[in-house]
Image (cartoon, grey):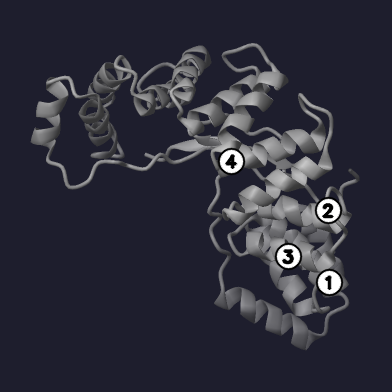
């Protein structure tokens, strides 16, 4: 079972977490909660859980959720999650929120998800804070409230949670729940980008290209777009291709441009299709053969992030 969190992506540049929210123009997506059960026998866990150990109850619940990924034992998992959550175990409260949000083991119930995320967030669970923020952002299970969304993203972002950092940056970029502030957008995109978040890397590249919140710097734009593209971020692949085609921040290279456009298209981002077609008319047969050989030798890399692409920032959009 894959836990996720929501994230916001800047339009033609934006990205949720292990608990999640939907595909909206932001960097949000539910994230994976590590499986904390290893090297402990089920018999030992069950004995401790039945004795009232909240940590053992939580870990036993994870065993029931993970032991058979194709058919998790939700009834037993929920029983022990509730027992653990009743003792204030934030991770158990978070997991209950996730199951309610995803409709796994329960009918989907955003209000119950928000209730459990709030309890977990108040107990210091920063992924729960990210998901709660997303629910407030989109008015799912709670009244839509961009100010509260911003506040909860800030809580998680300050704890080093990259999805929250990316979503917070998006809020500042668009002026959601706060005055628009490109400098703060760049700050938080950079924080997430330095933690390896591909959507944030892509968005930061866009800011460098456009000179929003940071000085215009095509070399830095290309560096961040390349890092994101190497992780399979489709919009970054398209825009890195454009940089190679135009020779901005990188040496002019039609073969590399055609190759990256093709990878992006194969990954689902069709925004570069016409650009690739136009580029192909300017390339020699030798260049096209070289590009196609590279594409065949290096199949498109699977996208590491499950965040939506439609919300990403773009070099081609007016800000």
* Label 3: how many Cα within 10 Å (few below 14, some 14–19, many 20+): many
Instruction: Say what secondary structure mark 4 lies in.
Output: helix
Residue 261: assigned label: 3
Distance, label 3 to label 2, CA atoms, is: 27 Å
Q: Find residue 66 and report its image quarter.
A: top left
Distance, label 1 to label 3, CA atoms, is: 10 Å
Location of residue 85 with respect to 187 vertically, above or below: above
Distance, label 3 to label 4, CA atoms, is: 26 Å
Quadrant for the C terminus in the image? top right
Quadrant for the N terminus in the image? top left
> Horizontally, is 298 left or right of 37 in the view?
right
Residue placed under numbered mark 1 in the picture: 245
Which badge, 3 or 2, comes first in the chain's sequence? 2
Instruction: Where is residue 276? Give x, y as percent.
Output: 80, 66
The answer to whether the residue labelled 3 contacts the one labelled 2, judged by CB atoms less than 8 Å apart, is no
Instruction: Where is residue 16? Give x, y as percent.
Output: 57, 36
Distance, label 2 to label 4, CA atoms, is: 21 Å
Q: Find residue 47 and report its image quarter.
A: top left
Location of residue 309 with respect to 285 vertically, above or below: above
Instruction: Say what secondary structure mark 2 lies in.
Output: loop
Residue placed under numbered mark 2 in the picture: 214
Distance, label 4 to label 1, CA atoms, is: 31 Å
* Label 2: how many Cα within 10 Å (few below 14, some 14–19, many 20+): some
Q: Find residue 158 and report its image quarter.
A: top right
Q: Residue at x 76, y 42 (%)?
A: 185
Instruction: Say what secondary structure mark 3 lies in.
Output: helix
The answer to whether the residue labelled 3 contacts the one labelled 4, judged by CB atoms less than 8 Å apart, is no
Q: Nearer the viewer, mark 3 or mark 4?
A: 4
Residue placed under numbered mark 4 in the picture: 163
Location of residue 49 with respect to 232 vertically, above or below: above
Residue 230 seen in the current view: yes
């Amino acid at each position: 079972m894959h836990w996720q969190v929501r994230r916001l992506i800047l339009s033609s540049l934006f990205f949720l977490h292990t608990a999640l929210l939907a595909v909206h123009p932001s960097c949000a997506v539910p994230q994976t909660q590590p499986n904390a059960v290893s090297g402990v026998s089920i018999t030992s866990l069950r004995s401790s859980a039945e004795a009232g150990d909240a940590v053992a109850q939580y870990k036993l619940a994870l065993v029931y959720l993970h032991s058979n990924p194709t058919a998790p034992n939700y009834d037993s998992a929920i029983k022990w999650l509730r027992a653990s959550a009743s003792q204030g175990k934030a991770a158990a409260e978070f997991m209950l929120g996730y199951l309610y949000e995803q409709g796994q083991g329960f009918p989907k119930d955003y209000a119950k998800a928000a209730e459990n995320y709030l309890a977990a967030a108040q107990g210091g669970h920063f992924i729960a804070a990210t998901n709660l923020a997303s629910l407030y952002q989109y008015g799912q299970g709670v009244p839509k409230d961009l100010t509260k969304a911003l506040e909860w993203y800030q809580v998680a972002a300050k704890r080093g949670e990259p999805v929250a950092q990316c979503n917070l940056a998006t809020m500042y970029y668009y002026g959601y729940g706060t005055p628009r502030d490109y400098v703060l957008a760049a700050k938080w995109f950079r924080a997430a980008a330095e933690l390896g978040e591909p959507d944030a890397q892509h968005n930061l590249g866009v800011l460098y290209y456009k000179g929003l919140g940071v000085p215009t710097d095509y070399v830095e734009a290309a560096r961040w777009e390349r890092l994101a593209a190497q992780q399979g971020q489709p919009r970054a692949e398209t825009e890195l291709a454009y940089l190679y085609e135009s020779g901005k921040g990188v040496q002019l290279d039609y073969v590399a441009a055609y190759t990256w456009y093709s990878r992006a298209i194969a990954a689902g981002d069709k925004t570069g299709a016409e650009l690739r077609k136009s580029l192909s008319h300017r390339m020699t047969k030798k260049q096209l053969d070289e590009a196609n050989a590279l594409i065949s030798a290096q199949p498109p890399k699977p996208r590491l992030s499950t965040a939506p692409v439609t919300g990403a920032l773009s070099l081609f959009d007016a800000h």
